[in-house]
Image (cartoon, rainbow, N blue to C red):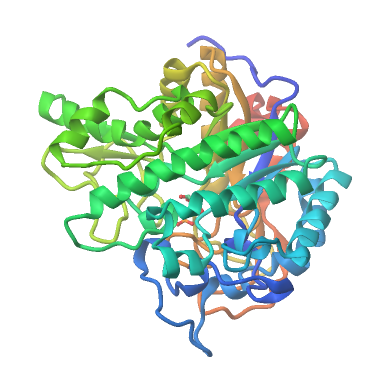
């Protein structure tokens, strides 16, 4: 076999990523209003919004890992880890507690000023998601989330406030986390509550249109207020394979993939793709648009494609790809092992997706989420030997290197959850991604103490050598 070489460019953004609602806690502090996550007991996949947020009940986001109060300690660890960039989100409801106020909440703005200053002081570039599964709860209750066109105005106001305030601090932005999850978890992606009603698909596409317009407005504003800034889109692009070479499996899988790529097609190419016409016709979808919407979308596409990649799944024609709660099921892939949460581990799939997306758009890629959720055990001597996580990371980074060699332009890679955080899907704390352990369990008990795991030293070495350590015997053998 040909020996591979290290292809990571010198300015590659090695990083880590979290989201405000999964880390900050302090759900009512500093004038913050509740977001959808604050009304979910068991995460976004399995949960329905509580009608009222109850006292004395454990809601995982209310304290999370208390990043709000401990970010300095965590950033010091990120610096030690050598992170070049750090992706987090701004909690919309810290800036506009209900979402529809006219003026932003100064205390909320101040918090992110201090957070970004701390990152920059430590030589870490902030990469910011504007909306990560945490729409202000009031916007769901009062307007039905992104089904309502009014949200474009509220989001615009929010964007103006944060772009103006952080224009000297943040260069890399992304509009909506995993926007293509509108189909699988519309509550998370578009604050649209799931109904069993026949109008569900109509609601999803209408809300998606509003998200597209909002994304274009945000890109326009961002480039105007912050010259030289980069506005990316963000999709969940874990890959999906046909179960067999039966053309029925192959084509249905292709259609499912297009259901995701529909979102990047609009956001990157700036046009509704031709295949969407048939979908709209067959499902009787009628999207209400205003004059100028399509022109706006066309003129303000995304600068880069940010995406998450965790796993692959396998599809057989006629079988559901989703369970009743929105989680991916699919068929078993006999070639792959699985995580403790049943997610197939497929490093080659990451190379596949990079090539697929780069071939399609020729726009820079940014892998803004990739990681392994696993149980960790603290040994008697206090150490945590997370070799499984190291192996996952090692194998995925080697495939990323192959994608670079294939010619894909890749800006950076942010590991999901460099410090343990609350699981978005299930609300569990014990589904851990971190290189840094956080002492807290699923019921919310624990000291919140941070402990470095074995993977911490491993990733640090990879970053310090700009990927070189991946190709030495010590790193490869882990
Ligand atoms: C992505 C989300 O879908 O997957 C993150 O953007 C999430 O917010 C991540 O945490 C991993 O999923 P989970 O359910 O293991 O937290």
Relative to residue 284, is residue 106 depicted above or below? below
Task: Inspect this view and state whether residue 127 appears.
Answer: yes
Q: Position of residue 209 (x, y in %)?
A: 39, 41
**Vertical relation: 55 (above or below) 400:** below
Q: Residue furthest front?
A: 291
Is residue 462 among what the camera can see? no
Residue in view at x 20 percent, y 34 percent: 279
Could you tell whether 261 is left or right of 88 in the image?
left
* Residue projecting furthest to the top: 2
Q: Residue furthest bottom?
A: 56
**Count of labels shown?**
0
Where does residue 20 sit, x and y in percent of width and height? 62, 59
Above or below, 303 relative to 329: above
Residue shown at 51%/46% (left/top)?
A: 177
Give the percent coordinates (x, y) of residue 98: 57, 68
- Give percent across and percent down for residue 207: 37, 48
**Residue 312 versus residue 222: which sits nearer the camera?**
222
Front-lying residue, 389 or 380: 389
Residue for point 58% across, 62% down: 21
Residue 410 located left or right of residue 200: right
Q: Quadrant of the C terminus?
A: top right
**Residue 403 vertical placement versus 54 (above, below):** above
Instruction: Depth check: give the residue in front, 105 or 365.
Output: 105
Q: Quadrant of residue 408?
A: top right
Q: Nearer the viewer, residue 195 or 209?
A: 209
Q: Residue at x 54, y 20 (%)?
A: 363
Q: Is residue 191 left or right of residue 429?
A: left
């Amino acid at each position: 076999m040909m020996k591979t070489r290290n292809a990571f460019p010198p300015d590659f953004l090695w990083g880590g990523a979290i989201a405000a609602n999964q880390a900050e806690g302090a759900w009512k502090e500093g004038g913050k209003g509740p977001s959808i996550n604050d009304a979910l007991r068991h995460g976004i996949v399995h949960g329905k919004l509580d009608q009222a947020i109850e006292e004395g009940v454990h809601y995982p986001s209310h304290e999370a890992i208390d990043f709000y109060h401990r970010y300095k300690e965590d950033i010091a660890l990120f610096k030690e880890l050598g992170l070049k960039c750090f992706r987090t989100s701004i909690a919309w409801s810290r800036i506009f507690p209900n979402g529809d106020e006219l003026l932003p909440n100064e205390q909320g703005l101040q918090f992110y000023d201090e957070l970004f200053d701390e990152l920059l002081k430590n030589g870490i570039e902030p990469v910011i998601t504007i909306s990560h599964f945490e729409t202000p709860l009031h916007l769901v209750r009062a307007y039905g989330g992104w089904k309502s066109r009014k949200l474009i105005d509220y989001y615009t106001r929010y964007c103006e406030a944060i772009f103006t305030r952080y224009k000297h601090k943040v260069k890399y932005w992304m509009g909506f986390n995993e926007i293509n999850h509108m189909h699988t978890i519309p509550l998370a992606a578009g604050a649209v509550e799931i109904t069993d009603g026949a109008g569900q698909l109509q609601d999803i596409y209408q809300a998606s249109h509003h998200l597209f317009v909002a994304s274009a407005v945000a890109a326009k504003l961002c480039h105007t207020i912050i010259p030289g800034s980069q506005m990316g889109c963000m999709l969940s692009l874990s890959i999906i394979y046909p179960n067999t070479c039966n053309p029925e499996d192959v084509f249905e899988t292709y259609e499912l993939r297009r259901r995701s790529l529909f979102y990047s097609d609009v956001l990157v190419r700036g046009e509704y793709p031709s295949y969407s016409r048939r979908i709209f016709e067959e499902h009787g979808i009628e999207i209400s648009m205003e004059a100028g919407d399509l022109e706006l979308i066309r003129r303000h596409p995304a600068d880069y494609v940010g995406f998450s990649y965790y796993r692959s799944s396998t599809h057989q024609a006629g079988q559901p790809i989703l369970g009743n709660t929105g989680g991916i099921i699919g068929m078993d892939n006999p070639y792959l092992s699985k995580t403790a949460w049943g997610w197939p581990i497929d490093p080659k799939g990451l190379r596949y997706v990079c090539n697929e997306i780069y071939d399609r758009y020729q726009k820079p890629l940014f892998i803004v989420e990739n990681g392994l959720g696993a149980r960790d055990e603290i040994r008697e001597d206090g150490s945590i030997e997370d070799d499984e996580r190291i192996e996952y990371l090692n194998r995925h980074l080697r495939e990323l290197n192959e994608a670079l060699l294939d010619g894909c332009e890749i800006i950076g890679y942010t590991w999901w959850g460099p410090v343990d955080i609350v699981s978005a899907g299930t609300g569990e704390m014990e589904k851990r991604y971190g290189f840094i352990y956080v002492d807290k369990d699923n019921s919310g008990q624990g000291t919140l103490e941070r402990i470095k795991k074995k993977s911490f030293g491993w990733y640090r070495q990879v970053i310090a050598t700009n990927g070189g350590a991946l190709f030495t015997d010590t790193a490869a053998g882990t």
